[in-house]
Image (cartoon, rainbow, N blue to C red):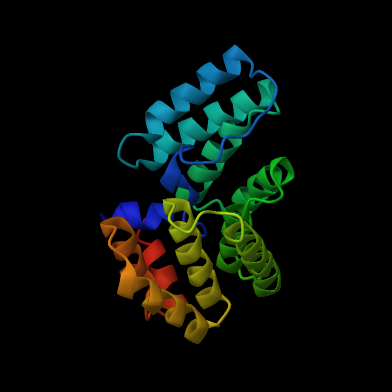
Amino acid sequence: MKKLIALIISFLIAMALRGQGLKEHKVAAVNQTAIQFNDSAVAIISQPYDSFNYSIALSLLETAIRIDSNFYVAYWNKLSVESQLRKYKQAIETGMKLIAFNPREPQFYGLVGSWYFRIGDSVSSTKYYNQAVILYDQALDTIDTNKIEFKLFKVNRAAILIMLNRSEEAHEILRQMQNIETDEVIKNLIEMVLDKTPQQIYDYLNKY
């Protein structure tokens, strides 16, 4: 359950979603050879973490992208692996590629912001966190409040507010959600973030 919680929050380690759970992204037909390399990498990263095997997976994903530079899912999987290997500078570059594909996806900005923070660039981190909040606000205005996506986006947004040192605002949002939420996954996510400091959240993430 702890790993599931870590996976869903947007600024968390991208490996979490393993290329799934993303909104569908329409691109031209993907090269079949590239798909094979991507699928081989996914088979590896679906197993328990091992740095040597993940390095092999990263190489496979890089090959897939060289074959087809528009292979959106391969970029996401590459981002996931780079994060697990703590290759944060590379993850930032890959995150920028995903932003180019879909500049209105808030989780990409949140992820890039988290990796800038990890390499000590607080100015860039703040810039990307702020953009993530703006995009979450815009998205939340368009999503049915009863949908799980709406609830996840609200938790994600609150988590990023904490990273921006807007904790009082974030915790108030989370407490309001906690008082009415019935979904166990969302409740666990709220509990993970509620009343936590930025450092506590990062310390949690560093376990994975």
Q: Is residue 185 left or right of residue 39?
A: left
Which residue shows up at 47% across the image and 31% down it?
56
- Whether residue 85 can be seen here: no
x and y, in percent, of residue 87 in the image: 55, 51
Taking the view exactly as shown, the residue that stands out farthest to the top is 32
Q: Nearer the viewer, residue 104 or 80?
A: 104
Position of residue 101 measured from the top left corner of the image (x, y, whole percent): 71, 40
Q: Residue at x 49, y 83 (%)?
A: 167
Tell me what residue is drawn at x 49 percent, y 42 percent.
81
Q: Is residue 57 visible?
A: yes
Vertical order, 164 against 59 (above or below): below
Q: Nearer the viewer, residue 127 or 121?
A: 127
The reply, left or right, for residue 19 in relation to residue 90 is left
Figure check: 163 above or below 139:
below
The number of discs equals 0
* Left or right: where 169 falls relative to 122: left
Assign the N terminus to one quadrant of the image.
bottom left
What residue is shown at x 30% (from left), y 56% (from top)? 185
